[in-house]
Image (tube, helix red, strand yellow):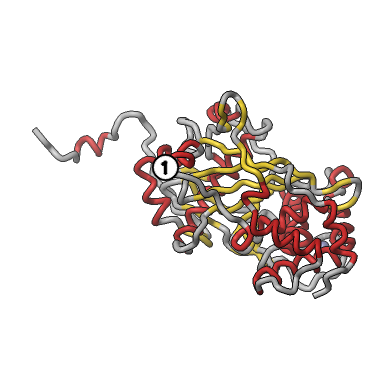
Amino acid sequence: MASSCTEIDVLENVNSKLLNFAFLRLGKKCNASESLSFARAVCNISSIKENEVLTVMNFDTLFNRGVNVLKDMKRGITVNMQQHDKTAVAILTKFLKEIEFHERSLMKVLGREQIEKESKSNSRRENEITVTLAEHLLGRLSPGQSYVINSRAKSRETCSCGEDHENNPTYRNTGIGHEDVWHGFVDVVLENAIASAEKPRVIDEDNKEGMDEFDGRTQTGDQSIAETISFSFIQKACHPSFENHLVPNIMIDSERFRILMYDADKDILLCGMDFPIFYENHLNITSVVILWLVLHYRIFCSGINDTPEELEKVKCNFTEVAGEKLEIYRKSLKAGVANFPTVKKETSVFPSYESILFGKRKW
Ligand SMILES: [Zn+2]
């Protein structure tokens, strides 16, 4: 493997020491126990604090394994790496070699906002952005080098950057969850991870309550948190023997991204900082490396390890807000769903005429 190639030199400026994750907690108004689509999820989140200061975790500590691989990469010592590390390093090296191509394609499509605003419908434009981000950034950095786009997207766009592509985007059913609890269709499925393309969400009067934090973007934030938690439970059910069950969701739009991670075993919800995709008309190398480390979390993330007492202090309380529906999250969540059956809901606060008539007489 080339150890001193110029692509590696750009990594010199990557400093992940200054990056942190915050711990989030779900509030009492969180509706995880109700049958609702992700779009209607309310999380009522707050940040966990001690003496008014946010409790945070350093990125280098959480991704210790990955950061060590990165250090070896910077020093050019890649010979003694384990095979899975070498495979991951090869993916990053390849991306850095082709970075100008991807940068051009991303800038071309993501920068179109103003020019084409009027000629394309919002949903087509959103899907165009999602496809390009998946094709030229997320999919390229992920372990499987592939991605799946939600087949319910209003249009089945191919990447519109104008360059030749080896393959067209794959559109499939991306439904996750369960009709009795939170459920819905995620925008992008990567290998063992998901990404939600941020879009403005209509705020209805009933849901205004959850809007107090998360940079004023709570409405999309709530949806992404619900997706993160549900997806993490699915991953835990599929891979119960993993040491660490922190699973990421990448919230991304045409300018920035934020990493959310949920540990379905320890009940811990993390929220990363906001990162810009570009820096002065170039892809931001730190952001690229962060995405690469996070997408390879299975080999690079060390998880949160502390005493049960300390872990208790940073729990997000999902197990409490889910209540008796927790078992559904643990055992019955589905993935790759095309349609969720409609769950009949009581429309009145009072039981129906029939349910009283046919009740079981106790006296
Ligand atoms: Zn393209």
- Where is residue 119? Give x, y as percent: 84, 47
Q: Quadrant of the N terminus?
A: bottom right
Residue 34 shows in this picture: no
Residue at mark 1: 319
> Residue placed farthest to the left in the image?
363
Quadrant of picture, ligand 1: bottom right
- Where is residue 181? Give x, y as percent: 44, 46
Disc 1 element? helix
Nearest the camera: 300 or 235?
300
- Where is residue 11? Give x, y as percent: 83, 57
Label 1 crowd bin: few (<14), some (14–19), many (20+), radius 10 Å: some
Nearest the camera: 248 or 359?
248
- Where is residue 107? Give x, y as percent: 87, 53
Nearest the camera: 46 or 76?
76
Q: Is residue 38 above or below residue 106?
A: above
Amino acid bearing label 1: Thr
Q: Quadrant of the C terminus?
A: top left
Q: Is residue 2 left or right of residue 241?
A: right
Q: Is residue 294 above or below residue 122?
A: below
